[in-house]
Image (cartoon, rainbow, N blue to C red):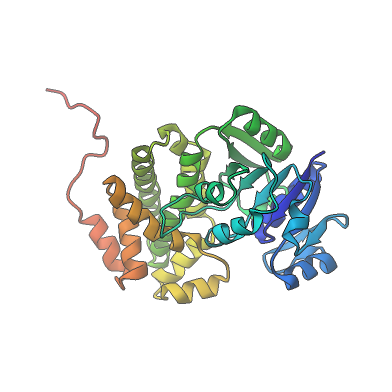
């Protein structure tokens, strides 16, 4: 049995708290919101973000981040990506040397173009920073629906320790040393999922969705490999796997926001109606910053930015994508003489 602190009591943090408790670990859940912790203590259910998933009576809840981190072998950082830096600053003085932090949020910081693990390492240098990612809606994990995911760590022993911590008969965990590839796949798929949702909102069909998924993973892999990530990562669970589930499911807040935008809502109106953090909006500008830095073309992500931030109509963005210059699909393939 391990002692685990869950830093962030949203849908994903709560679902992982339930999973880890069922695995026999002692779990303490932290939130900065007093009303959220009061709800969890009194009702043992997150009525707003994970309704129907009951939390055990002996699970601990606190608004004291030092209490959540004290004597814990592992901290699961489950706050929205836009709060990763501020929460990491709060952890700086309470995390012990060598304590493991598992980041489960997905995003890229717009101003610095840093991945979330890079932010955590900068703010909490004494921690061992790892990631957990893959095609995994909190709503399904909380209900024990079979899910497969990847843990990324610099050292094999750390990855295998976390694999054993999280793995169960309904939660299969693979390991990988490619932290960068895992994080880029998890972050950029949210932007492509916005595009998929926009296409749905416009009334387009399965052909369009398939095109966005396949060309979207091409863009993600193009940028990722230029940055030094492994191509194989984008063919796996945290690449094409996560992209498929986020583009296709109504659990996906990014797809839902995209649908509303495709139907004519503004970005702000769509985010307000979804009532949860739409990570793809925060990663879209950062993706274009990385594209410029590494001299990589990301036409789908570029059009999403135009719709989100430049007032371009969704229909016009799709038209511009369709009328781009003619291209080869597989540039490395050779024609017959």
Q: In the rendered view, would you say 259 is above or below 139? A: below
**Residue visible at 37% across and 37% down?**
225
Q: Position of residue 142 (x, y in %)?
A: 71, 53
Q: Is residue 310 visible?
A: yes
Q: In the rendered view, would you say 113 is above or below 129? A: below
Looking at the rendering, in which quadrant would you find the N terminus?
top right
**Residue visible at 45% across and 36% down?**
235
Q: Position of residue 318 (x, y in %)?
A: 29, 61
**Residue visible at 67% across and 54% down?**
93
Looking at the rendering, in which quadrant would you find the C terminus?
top left
Q: In the rendered view, would you say 197 is above or below 122? A: below
Q: Is residue 331 left or right of residue 141?
A: left
Q: Is residue 251 visible?
A: no
Front residue of 236/62: it is: 62
Q: Quadrant of residue 112?
A: bottom left
Front residue of 117/19: it is: 117
Q: Quadrant of residue 327?
A: top left
């Amino acid at each position: 049995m391990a002692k685990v602190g869950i830093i962030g009591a949203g849908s994903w943090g709560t679902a992982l708290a339930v999973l880890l408790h069922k695995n026999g670990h002692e779990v303490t859940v932290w939130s900065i919101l007093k009303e959220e912790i009061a709800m969890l203590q009194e009702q043992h259910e997150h009525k707003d973000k994970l309704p129907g998933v009951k939390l055990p009576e002996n699970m601990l809840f606190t608004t004291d981040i030092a209490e959540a981190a004290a004597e814990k072998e592992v901290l699961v950082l489950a706050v929205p990506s836009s709060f990763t830096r501020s929460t990491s600053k709060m952890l700086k003085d309470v995390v012990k040397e060598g304590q493991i932090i598992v980041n489960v949020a997905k995003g890229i910081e717009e101003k610095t173009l840093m991945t979330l693990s890079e932010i955590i390492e900068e703010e909490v240098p004494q921690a061992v920073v790892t990631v957990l990612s893959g095609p995994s809606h909190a709503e399904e994990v909380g209900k024990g629906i079979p899910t497969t995911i990847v843990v990324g760590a610099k050292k094999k022993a750390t990855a295998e320790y976390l694999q054993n911590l999280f793995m169960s008969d309904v939660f299969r965990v693979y390991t990988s040393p490619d932290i960068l590839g895992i994080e880029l796949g998890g972050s950029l798929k949210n932007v492509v999922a916005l595009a998929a949702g926009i296409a749905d909102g416009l009334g387009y069909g399965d052909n369009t969705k398939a095109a966005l998924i396949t060309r979207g993973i091409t863009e993600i892999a193009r940028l990722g490999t230029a940055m030094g990530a492994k191509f194989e990562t984008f063919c796996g669970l945290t690449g094409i796997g996560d992209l498929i589930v986020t583009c296709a499911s109504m659990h996906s807040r990014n797809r839902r926001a995209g649908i509303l935008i495709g139907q004519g809502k503004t970005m702000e109106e769509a985010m307000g109606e979804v009532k949860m953090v739409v990570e793809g909006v925060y990663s879209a500008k950062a993706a274009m910053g990385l594209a410029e830095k590494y001299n990589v073309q990301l036409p789908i992500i570029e059009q999403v930015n135009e719709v989100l931030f430049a007032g371009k109509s969704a229909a016009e963005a799709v038209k511009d994508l369709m009328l781009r210059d003619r291209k080869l699909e597989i540039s490395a393939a050779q024609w017959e003489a």
